[in-house]
Amino acid sequence: MKRLIEKGLMFGNLVPVDSPALVERYNRALKQLTGKTTALADFHVDISGYSPEVGDELGDHLYLNPNGCNRQFILLSTEQKSAPLLNAQFSTSRGILRSFIEANEPQLFALTAHDAVAGELANSVWELSSPARLFDIRHIKVEADTTRAHVENAEELAGLIRRFKAEEDGWWDDVLIAQMIGLAKETGDVTRNPVQLTQTEAEQGNFWTSHFGGLYVFRDVDHPAVISVGPRADLGELPLRYVFELTDVDYIAKFLELNGLTEPIVKARGADAAAILRQKMDFILIEAAATLGYDLGGASRHDLRQLAQRLGSGLPEAFKGLAAMLRWVEGGGPWPRISSRHPAYFYTLRAAPGPERALVNQLLAELTPLDVRQLFICHKQLFYRLYSSWSEPKKTFVADFLEREYQVDKAGARAALFGPEPGMDHEPPEPVPDLVERVGPWGAVRRGR
């Protein structure tokens, strides 16, 4: 992993905590949330205030995320809004935190100038003893205050001021006035500078979680389903009717199609389909070359083309399917019939525009792990896990490629691969025919127990 760290491909964009004042504020918040402190003089934090260095020191990388739900956070600066969320257990957590910071940026900027803001992504579930408990998580609320309770005290002071103004004998109420003076010493003049945070609330509808081996939960779509990375039998009874495994490719393909969640790359608006297909073919060749022991040092596209010629009939089926699709795109071949069981099928898709685009692209990355660029962008946890098992030549090639082709223009690369960021004006999905409602979208599909 050292190679990835050096190239900024791992632990990138973390915020440094490198002054005694910041460390002292962090420790106050850490003590309040966990009862622990760090002896480190400097470290780095992600958007939630989690630090891999502190996690190593404490021997607990879930020190801000006990039980994997109700994630706690420490904000030392609004700059954390651009940092990643490490060790994410839910795909929705970073978006909720970023929205909270952006909605309260002026207030948080003022508060973090003097203190740390500590808080929690609170829901009604405190433990996840079974997969069914995941479905009890629906409403997420961000609760936050400084370690010295500036927000709470400001709210109390504002209430006392209203009472002072409303009561006829307020000027002679010495106890009330003393309370106001005492709180004002902590909060400042709340009449001119209100200390108030907008408590971001979010609905957790469709999401991915790392719990129970990895689950993709789609419950706010026309045809809800759960897609499990692990065996379906291990999940027990779930409140959704349809439960698929990653190997249920026919059902997953139909699920994505019925809900309008994907689109073919070759038909995607504004996509350079030929360039995307060629790059996916290169990644598949890299895996084949690494498996056969070929030297990948400094391999160019010309070298990969020669490798494809040497492999001939031994080329992977996924490569052949994408090559047929590329011939059609370039006008030199017939439309290839690639069914959902073909190894190339999911490589030909990307998420359709809409609010679930990031989640669907993450699922597609899990279904197409040889596309290392999409894997790195959309599912970093899986990328890092698979990377550790690759051969050294493949590690070198992939790290060099990502540094060269992705790091220099992340936003441009994402737009080229997945389209512009989703807006609020996406078109609603087409209504589903009545026949589907009557017979069920997947026919005789196996159902969750």
Image: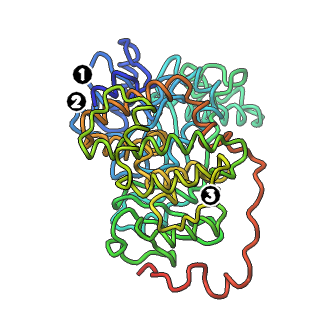
Q: Are marks 2 and 1 in contact (CB under 8 Å)?
A: yes
In this rendering, the answer to whether 301 lies above or below 191 is below
Q: How crowded is mark 1: few (under 14 residues within 10 Å), some or many (20 or more)?
A: few
Tag 1 residue: 39
Q: How crowded is mark 2: few (under 14 residues within 10 Å), some or many (20 or more)?
A: few
Q: How crowded is mark 3: few (under 14 residues within 10 Å), some or many (20 or more)?
A: many
Which tag, 1 or 3, sits closer to the chain's start? 1
Give how far across and how far down residue 388 sits, in percent: 26, 40
Q: Which residue is drawn at 64% across and 38% down?
A: 198
87 or 102: nearer the viewer: 87
Q: Which mark is residue 262?
A: 3
* Residue 302 found in image quarter: top left
397 or 139: nearer the viewer: 397
Give how far across and how far down residue 382 sits, in percent: 37, 47
Q: Residue at x 59, y 61 (%)?
A: 336
* Residue 1 found in image quarter: top left
Give the Cα distance between marks 1 and 3: 48 Å
Which tag, 2 or 3, sits closer to the chain's start? 2
Please state which amino acid type lies under the numbered disc 1.
Ala
Q: Do the residues labelled 2 and 3 touch (CB within 8 Å)?
A: no
Give how far across and how far down residue 32 sits, in percent: 36, 34
Q: Do the residues labelled 1 and 3 touch (CB within 8 Å)?
A: no
Which tag, 2 or 1, sits closer to the chain's start? 1
Please state which amino acid type lies under the numbered disc 2.
Glu
Q: Which residue is drawn at 61% across and 72% down?
A: 223
In this rendering, the answer to whether 432 lies above or below 12 is below
Give the Cα distance between marks 2 and 1: 9 Å
Q: Which mark is residue 57?
A: 2
Please state which amino acid type lies under the numbered disc 3.
Thr
